[in-house]
Amino acid sequence: MTAGNPAGHILYFALPLLAGSLLQQFYNMVDSWVVGRYVGDGALAAVGVGFPVLTMFSSLFIGLSNGGTVVIAQFFGAGKTERVRDAVDTVYAAFLMSIIPLTALALLAVGPILRLLQVEPGAYDEACLYLTAVCAGLTGSVGYNLNAGILGGLGNSRSTLLFLAVASVMNIALDLALVLVCGLGVLGVALGTIIAQAFSWLFGVAYINRRYPEISLRLFPRTFDRALFRQIMGIGLPAGVQMSLVALGAMVVMGKINSYGKEFTAGYNVGFRLDQLAFLPIQSLSSAVVSFVGQNTGARRPDRVRQGVQITVMLSAAWAVLMTAVLMPFSGPLVAFFSDTPAVVHAGAVYLNCIMPFYFLFAVMFCLNNAMRGAGDSVFPMVNVILSLILVRVPAVYWLADRFGPDYMYYGMAVGWTVGLVLSAAHYFSGRWKRKSITGGENGP
């Protein structure tokens, strides 16, 4: 990524990520479609409740993966192959030492968290069953993300598409078999997810060991570099804490949503799935810019860093505007595909019609934060997100819901996005993030 057309590199990296993410979201939507059509609205609400909870538990490892991506990309861009191997070993050693305690903690916390979320009695048992099963299988999900982070640092996003393609086919087949044939309901959906994720993780380990024998993954890694681990966590921990707190904020918002009944929760779940689907190209471009900025920071190419960020921001904003034009007119029919209950359709359409006019704000903010994270500055994006998406957004959602009713609560998200974009743009153009490189390279806004 340190030579040639920046736009070409970013798109070449982002497109496989996009295809893989589409597959992932496709099987997530199959989950929602199967439970919504063949189990019930209570099960559909239960699956939706599980998302922020799982994100909270896995986010520290996703932060570790993000930190590993940045460090590996900078070492790779600087031509320091030995340090790339040390970083991979350190990341995997940390994962293997901590995944069992995290899984145990997640299982113990399922009940208290569901009570905190005020899950309606009609969806509580199914939500508890779904979350317990998926938390027990966290290893596969976390392991896949670590593999993707390692390959992303090396500039290889194509292989993760293969892993996700296999997992997606397996998950869809297992969903249909375990729910429609075996009649396992939400348990079948959960089992299909964790089996597919575990297979994807192990497939990724085998691929990395064969394709990159110099950094082969082992049950007992060769080394655990404490100093390097501190550098990785210096970048990854703020990202992990950020995701945990955002998930916690989403859970607080979910508590308000749940107070309006399972149909409203189910509608939000469907709208959120469609929102995620629309956001995938922006997420893929932002992942690409992390690796692009990281490698060019390591290679000391500030001109390419600047060009890459500009291209990513423009593409992401354009996509956000396009999705707004597509989703708003068809919000009702799209939600109705998952549930024909009028209250569910109304709630899902309300969510999409509230957030989509302001989608471009979040797109630009997200890209700028990830670009600065690729340069090694992970603290500012964390502070920015905590302030805008938690301290501003959550109270705004509650205030609007209490003052004007549930149909207006989601405008609080736009308030948070506006604050976040203003802060991101100010920090980016200040240029202070350019001093965070671990290899001594500098970049500029």
Image (tube, rainbow, N blue to C red):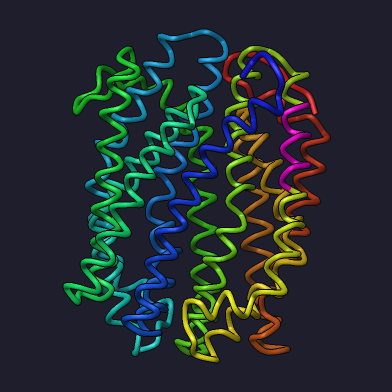
| Above/below status of 151 relative to 285 | above
Which of the two residues, 334 or 228, is positioned nearer the viewer here? Answer: 334
Q: Give x and y (percent) for residue 355.
A: 70, 69
Q: Is residue 95 left or right of residue 430?
A: left
Q: Quadrant of the N terminus?
A: top right
Q: Residue at x 32, y 59 (%)?
A: 172
Give the quadrant of the C terminus: top right
Of residues 324 and 408, the one nearer the viewer is 324
Relative to 314, 215 lies left or right = left
Residue drawn at (44%, 28%), measured in percent from left and top? 151
Residue 361's place in the image compared with 125, above or below, is above
**What's the magenta region?**
307-316
Residue 57 magenta-drawn?
A: no
Q: Position of residue 329 (x, y in %)?
A: 72, 74
Determine if the magenta segment contains residue 308.
Answer: yes
Q: Where, by quadrant of the figure, is residue 325 drawn?
A: bottom right
Query: Majority secondary structure of the magenta segment?
Result: helix
To which quarter of the image does residue 323 belong?
Answer: bottom right
Q: What residue is at 75 percent from the left and 41 percent from the top?
A: 313
Give the x, y percent position of residue 372. 67, 34
28, above or below 48, in the image: above
Where is residue 362, by image quadrant? bottom right
